[in-house]
Image (cartoon, grey):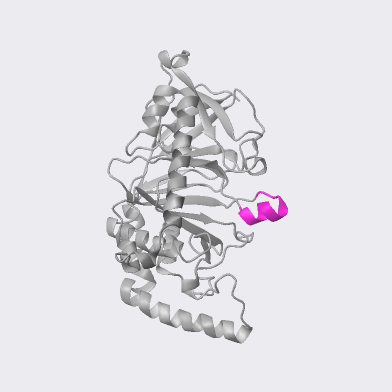
C-alpha cells in the first residue's frame, strides 16, 4: 500500500487521521485540567501507586458502580464524560508513572490473559494525561496508529507506509488513541536516530545506573537514617521530570483486565484478602463511609475541585505533517533507518525480533521528536 507523502509542514485536522477501517481517531486536547488540579492528581496518583502490587487499579463508571469512586477516579471519569463516553458501563483501568523513562514500543494488553491463555486482548481506548513536565523537557509519546496489538498483526511487509504520531508532554494535555495501537516513549527523544554504537553505549550506561540504584536501596535502612520521614515523601517533587496518569477503557461487552482489582481505598477488597460475605460487606461499608466523608471535606462532592475543565475550555489540536518531501530528503543523505525497540516476548510483540527498522526523513523525525508542544504526523516506510 503506497502513498505519496504531502509537503512537509502541512497541517491536518486530527479528525481526518484514521487508524484503519472502522478504528477510532487519535485525538489530542490541551487545557483539559488546571495546573492546580494536575498537581493534586499527581500527588494522589503517587499515593495510589504505592497501594497496589503493580500500581494499577480498575473501576466501573457511574451509574453502574457498586463502590464509590475515589477522587482520582472521579477526575478520570470527568474527562471521559467530556470525551463522549458518558453513561457507559465499561471498566476503566488506570495507573501512573512519575519518572521519565525509556518505554519500548508496545500495545497495552491483558497481561494475565497472555500469560495464562496465550491470547492477546487490548482495551478499547488508551489515554495519557500529562500532569507535571520538567522545564525544557520534551518526553513525547509516540503512537503507531496502524500497528494494532502487535507489529506484524497488520500482515503487511516492506515498502508499506505507516503513520507515526508524536505528542510532546504538556501539562493538562490528554492524548487519546485506539487501545490496541502500539506506542512508545523514547528517552532521550532522539533515541531512534542514534547509531547502533551510540545505542549500545546508552544501554550500557542505563544498566550501570539501574545496578547502582538497586545497590543503593539494598543498603538503605530507614531505621538508620534520622532524617527519613515518610510524611515528607510526597512533598519532594522537584526531581519529577515527567508525571503522567494513564487510563484505558475496556469494551462494555467484555470483562476488564484479569487480575486487576479495585483501589482498596474505595472499599474494594485488597488482593489476597479473603473474608466471608458478612465480614466483607461490613469491611466495605465501614471503609466507604469513612472515606466518603474525608474526600467530600477535602475535594467537595464527587471531587469537584479536581475534576476536569468544562469541555468548552478544551482545545482540540491539529497535527503538523512532517513528511520530509523535499528534494534532499528523498536522497540517501536525507533519509535514515530508524531503529525501534519492541517490548516483551515474541508472542507479545508479534514480531520475530526485538526491534524493527523503518525508513524516514532524518530532518522531519528530528524536528518532531524535539518539538516543544505541537503534535506531529510523520510518514515512515517499513524495511
When asked about the image quadrant of residue 368, the answer is top left
Q: Is residue 115 magenta?
A: yes
Q: Position of residue 224 (x, y in %)?
A: 36, 65
Count the marks: 0
Can the viewer see residue 212 in this picture? yes
Horizontal arrangement in the rendering, residue 266 relative to residue 294 (left or right)? right
Q: Residue at x 66, y 34 (%)?
A: 352
- Toward the viewer: 319 or 230? 230
> What percent of the width, then of the height, locates residue 54?
52, 59
* Main SS, magenta residues: helix
Give the x, y percent position of residue 73: 44, 65
Say whether residue 43 is left or right of residue 341: left
Against 154, residue 82 (above or below) is: below
Instruction: Decide: is 237 above or below 191.
Output: below
Magenta residues, start to end: 110-120
Q: Relative to 335, is 51 above or below?
A: below
Res 168 quadrant in image: top left
Tell me which residue sits at (32%, 73%) in the image: 298
Who's the residue at 36% across and 29% down the image? 367
Q: Quadrant of the C terminus?
A: top right
Amino acid at each position: 500500500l503506497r502513498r505519496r507523502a504531502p509537503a512537509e509542514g502541512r497541517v491536518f485536522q486530527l479528525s481526518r487521521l484514521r487508524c484503519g477501517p472502522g478504528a477510532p481517531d487519535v485525538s489530542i486536547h490541551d487545557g483539559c485540567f488546571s495546573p492546580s488540579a494536575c498537581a493534586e492528581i499527581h500527588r494522589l496518583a503517587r499515593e495510589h501507586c504505592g497501594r497496589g502490587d503493580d500500581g494499577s487499579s480498575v473501576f466501573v463508571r457511574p451509574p453502574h458502580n457498586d463502590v464509590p469512586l475515589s477522587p482520582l477516579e472521579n477526575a478520570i471519569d470527568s474527562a471521559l464524560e467530556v470525551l463522549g463516553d458518558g453513561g457507559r458501563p465499561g471498566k476503566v483501568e488506570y495507573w501512573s508513572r512519575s519518572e521519565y523513562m525509556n518505554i519500548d514500543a508496545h500495545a497495552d494488553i491483558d497481561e494475565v490473559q497472555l500469560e495464562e491463555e496465550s491470547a492477546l486482548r487490548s482495551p478499547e481506548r488508551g489515554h495519557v494525561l500529562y500532569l507535571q513536565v520538567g522545564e525544557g523537557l520534551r518526553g513525547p509519546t509516540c503512537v503507531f496508529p496502524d500497528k494494532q496489538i502487535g507489529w506484524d498483526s497488520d500482515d503487511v511487509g516492506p515498502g508499506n507506509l505507516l503513520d507515526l504520531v508524536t505528542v510532546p508532554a504538556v501539562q493538562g494535555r490528554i492524548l487519546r488513541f485506539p487501545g490496541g495501537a502500539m506506542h512508545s516513549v523514547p528517552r532521550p527523544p532522539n533515541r531512534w536516530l542514534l547509531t547502533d554504537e551510540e545505542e549500545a553505549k546508552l544501554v550500557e550506561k542505563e544498566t550501570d545506573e539501574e545496578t547502582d540504584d538497586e545497590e543503593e536501596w539494598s543498603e538503605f535502612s530507614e531505621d538508620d537514617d534520622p532524617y527519613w520521614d515518610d510524611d515528607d515523601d510526597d512533598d519532594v517533587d522537584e526531581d519529577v521530570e515527567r508525571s503522567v496518569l494513564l487510563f484505558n477503557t475496556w469494551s462494555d461487552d467484555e470483562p476488564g483486565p484479569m487480575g486487576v482489582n479495585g483501589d482498596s481505598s474505595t472499599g474494594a477488597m485488597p488482593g489476597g484478602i479473603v473474608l466471608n460475605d458478612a465480614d466483607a460487606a461490613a469491611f466495605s461499608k465501614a471503609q466507604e463511609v469513612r472515606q466518603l466523608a474525608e474526600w467530600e471535606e477535602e475535594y467537595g462532592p464527587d471531587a469537584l475541585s479536581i475534576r476536569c475543565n468544562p469541555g468548552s475550555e478544551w482545545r482540540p489540536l491539529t497535527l503538523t505533517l512532517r513528511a520530509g518531501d523535499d528534494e534532499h530528503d528523498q536522497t540517501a543523505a536525507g533519509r535514515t533507518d530508524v531503529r525501534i525497540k519492541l517490548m516483551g516476548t515474541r508472542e507479545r510483540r508479534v514480531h520475530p525480533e526485538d526491534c524493527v527498522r523503518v525508513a524516514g526523513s532524518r530532518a522531519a523525525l528530528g524536528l518532531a521528536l524535539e518539538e516543544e508542544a505541537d503534535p506531529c504526523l510523520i510518514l515512515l516506510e517499513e524495511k
